[in-house]
Amino acid sequence: MKSTALKPSKTPLKVIPIGGLGEIGMNCMILEADEEILVIDCGLLFSDLDHFGVEFIIPDFTYLRDRKDKIKGIFLTHGHEDHIGALGFALKSGIDAPIYCSTFTSLLVRERLKEYDLNDKVDMRVFKMGDQIQFKQFKVTTASVNHSIVDAAALIIDTSVGKIIHTGDFKIDPVPFIGTELDRNVFKKAGDEGVLLLLSDSTNAEQHEHSMSEGGIYPKFEQLLAAAEGLVVISMFASNVARMSQIFTLAKKMKKKIAVCGRSMNQNIALAQEIKYIHDVQDVLVNLDELKNYPRNELIVLSTGCQGEYRAALARMSIGEDKNITLQQGDLVLMSSKMIPGNERAISKVINELFKRGAKVLYESVHELHVSGHACQPELKEMLKLVRPKFFIPIHGEYRHLVHHADLARETGITDDRIQIVTNGSVVELTPDSCKVTDKLEETRVLIEGREGSEMTKLVLKDRRKLGETGVVFTLMVRNKESRLIISGPEVILKGIVNEAQEGWLIEEAKNIVKKIVEEYESNINRGEGESDLQEDVRVELRRFFNQNLGKKPVVVPIVLEM
């Protein structure tokens, strides 16, 4: 599309994050002009409430759905789940807009949308780095950045009020294994032209040293693989194509075989082969059921499960339940990933079980086998100095990360009045001369139950918490439909209240209480005084009884069947 100048606007541009600020995950940013909206990323957040059935959390798309006719494009900076994972839900909710993304990201999106039967129903537009996409009130220029996934992009966005840069997730890697170092000239040129607002990744804003290079991992793997005396299992994020490519390169060099364990890893290797980021692996790859045909010290297993996921391949190996891989003394497990906050307990459990199997395990706190895909303080400051923005909003991080990133901005000369620390739902109005929060959206997140993707309300979650904390009591009675008298029961069933040894006397006492309530209920009927609310009376009295004896009020479910 031919590039044209954007007409200046006197109306403020709205910048509205509905995910990704104040948390790690669920990244989603709205840029809203008079007539057009651009959405940047559409990610999910894996939930720590999975024991209540909450699989993950997605942005609340109500604001976008109410303005869906204004949405001109959804731009995806890269293919991680926290940037693309909610896309299917956005599309299913009625948001119908072209999706702009890089080549590898488009392949990941294609596979993700197959799960929702949407892959053939979307307008996918693949960009190359440096492409310009023109709209009436926006012009987007894509720029390559280094990250822990290939084909990551930053967005340089000309708007009717000024230039905005959204870095996406980035680092400055001097020797990436795939691709080239971030092109500083692209960002310096934008800075020379004048940047009104910088939105920059804050994930590693607490880290003082420059991030390590992905290329620096290669010699460490080479040393460990060369010295291996048994089977080597390497667990990593399935999206880290560059690291998987390093393993394949070393396997070919050392004449070792690789088997892949985990659906997502198999899928991503196939996608990487499709666009030649991983190639010539036919002589290296073997099926899992072929492992027995080779000496153990000639074998490498690439495995999912680096975050301790109980259903993943590594967890199955750790408890001896994988049908193809049985770990033994002399085997080596390399966990080439960072422990994501919240996953420490699950990961530690897997590590302990792996040691019990006789394997030697190398992980984050004892060996450097992972490098972050996010910029640390020196790189964040360099980006700020290259861009020299008039205003700055730190993004992508927990609140403390945003605060630390704001401190770095002050060190580069940006004054307090030009820095905004905002959180999800903040409505920021941007003009050539101001950047300020003017409103707040009431709700920015939706709880999703199970992989089928049904929404869970806060009321349902509250009920599940209550059940989990206090247990449930069922009472069952049968009532004559005509006489309204009880003809059978009561039966009392306790679930999650106390251990079996204590249940007996509680059940008998609970029955006696219900019987007394029934006697009074029937007495009133016989005297012609009318029918009281039997179920409510049972519920109130049993909750009082259990609270007096156990110090908690369980959920009481009185059931009265009519016959």
Image: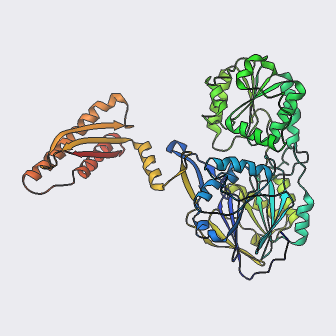
Expressed as whole percent of the image width and height from the top left, the position of residue 496 reads 39, 37
* Residue 80 visible to an observer of this rendering: no
User: Residue placed at 62% from the left, 31% from the top?
Assistant: 349
Residue closer to the observer: 183 or 100: 100
User: Residue placed at 72% from the left, 55% from the top?
Assistant: 401
Expressed as whole percent of the image width and height from the top left, the position of residue 503 reads 32, 32
Q: Is residue 1 above or below residue 562?
A: below
Q: Quadrant of residue 311?
A: top right
Q: The N terminus appears in which quarter of the rendering?
A: bottom right
Residue closer to the observer: 22 or 209: 22
Q: Is residue 218 above or below residue 110?
A: above
User: Residue placed at 69% from the left, 36% from the top?
Assistant: 306
User: Residue placed at 70% from the left, 53% from the top?
Assistant: 83
Residue lying at the far front of the rendered structure: 120
Residue closer to the observer: 462 or 135: 135
Q: Is residue 345 above or below residue 433?
A: above
Looking at the image, how many numbered discs can be counted on the residues? 0
Q: The C terminus appears in which quarter of the rendering?
A: top left
Expressed as whole percent of the image width and height from the top left, the position of residue 407 reads 77, 61
Tell whether 148 sits left or right of 339: right
Expressed as whole percent of the image width and height from the top left, the position of residue 494 reads 33, 37
Q: Quadrant of residue 97?
A: bottom right
Residue lying at the far bottom of the rendered structure: 10
Q: Is residue 542 above or below residue 421?
A: above
* Residue 346 visible to an observer of this rendering: yes
Residue lying at the far left of the rendered structure: 527
Tell whether 377 sits left or right of 23: right
Residue closer to the observer: 550 or 493: 493
